Image (cartoon, rainbow, N blue to C red):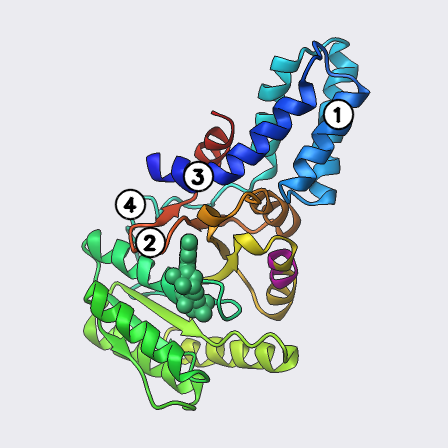
Amino acid sequence: KESLNQGLQKTKEGFLTRLTKAVAGKSTVDEEVLDNLEDALVSADVGIDTTVQIIKQIEKRVAKDKYINTSELNNLLQQEIENILVDAPEQSYRDFSTPSGNKPYVILVVGVNGVGKTTTIGKLAYNFKKAGKSVLLGAADTFRAAAVDQLTIWSERVGVPIVKQGMGADPGAVAFDTVQSGVARGADVVIIDTAGRLHNKAYLMEELSKISRVIKKVMPDAPHEVLLVLDGSTGQNAVEQARQFTAATDVTALAITKLDGTAKGGVVLAIANQFKIPVKFIGVGEKMEDLLVFDKHEFVDSLFN
Ligand code: GDP
């Protein structure tokens, strides 16, 4: 709770300041308050479409109830924002237990370079290990030598094994080896890093679908999760990346990183609303403890209180 509050502090400060300004000197929610509110949401990077949707809902309530005072507006806004966020379908990450029947539970991690993919994998490994799970990492981003090195550093830091091959190796082969080795070792969780070269969309799509295909040769129902990592501090860029990756592959979950460094955490709403894919994790710092399991109620509560 505390790390969530800290992580969202900048977003909260910016948002609440604007919200306070939006209703300053007003007792009821009128046209002007709604206009100000719209500005406040847009500047928090909630995105135009999502903002308009929220404002419309509030307008409806104002029209229906005739009189809404500005303190009621806060509650209304919280409700509407919570409604927009997608419920995580299962709560297995709460305690980092893995769904039964999937052993190993295979998580494929995708995203553009620099968004915090490797860090997120390290943090996930740390959490699973802490929960008593055996974890195996796979370095299928074979395009950048640095990516394999970084993942190796994380595997040492957390104390979990890693499967890797030489630079330039076939990513599919690394993924195959990793899952096979995970099965052989009886690992609980396998987490596979992938390359994030968005400049070549057809290639990316092909590479990701090939990785999925070869993983299925070892485990037909894997990957069990395709986690897209997005950098929350990049605002609309993150939205654009979400668009491209969801078009390229079946993304099942989102991790939004670097929310600690930005006042634009509203992008979480924009992305959740636009793509209807659950945000399952948020990153609020560089350390391995700085990954939080996303809970929409807690998130909204931290933004307002
Ligand atoms: P990758 O290229 O996507 O694998 O990105 P990295 O995992 O190497 O992360 C890029 C940089 O972002 C590193 O300096 C990380 O420490 C930093 N980083 C990752 N996640 C977070 C986060 O949640 N908060 C902050 N402040 N920094 C982060």
Residue at point 32% right, 78% down? 149
Please report whichever mark, 1 or 4, sits nearer to the chain's N-terminal start.
1
Q: What is the secondary structure assignment of the residue under circle 1?
A: helix
Q: Position of residue 48 (x, y in %)?
A: 74, 43
Q: On the image, numbered disc 4 is attached to which residue? A: 95
> Which residue corresponds to the image point at 63% horizontal and 52% vertical from the top-left?
275
Q: CA distance from mark 4 to mark 2?
A: 11 Å
Please tell me the numbered disc located at residue 34: 1
* Residue 54 locus on image (x, y percent): 69, 32
Quarter of the image for residue 85 reads top right
Image quadrant occupied by the N terminus = top left
Q: Which residues are magenta?
A: 238-242
Q: Secondary structure at mark 3?
A: loop
The quadrant of the picture showing ligand 1 is bottom left
User: Residue 99 shows which numbered tag?
Assistant: 2
At label 2, the amino acid type is: Pro
Discs 1, 2 touching: Cβ within 8 Å: no
Is residue 57 a member of the stretch shown in magenta?
no
The residue at which mark 3 appears reads as 295
Foreground: disc 3 or disc 4: 3
Report the mark closest to the observer, 2 or 3: 3
Badges 1 and 3: C-beta atoms under 8 Å apart? Answer: no
Give the amino acid type for the residue marked by disc 1 in the picture: Leu
Mark positioned earlier in the residue sequence (1 or 3):
1
Residue 255 visible in this rendered orientation of the protein: yes
Mark 3–mark 4 distance (CA, rounded to whole Å): 13 Å
Disc 2 residue crowd, few under 14, some 14–19, many 20+, Cα 10 Å: some
Rendering coords of residue 122 (x, y %): 32, 63
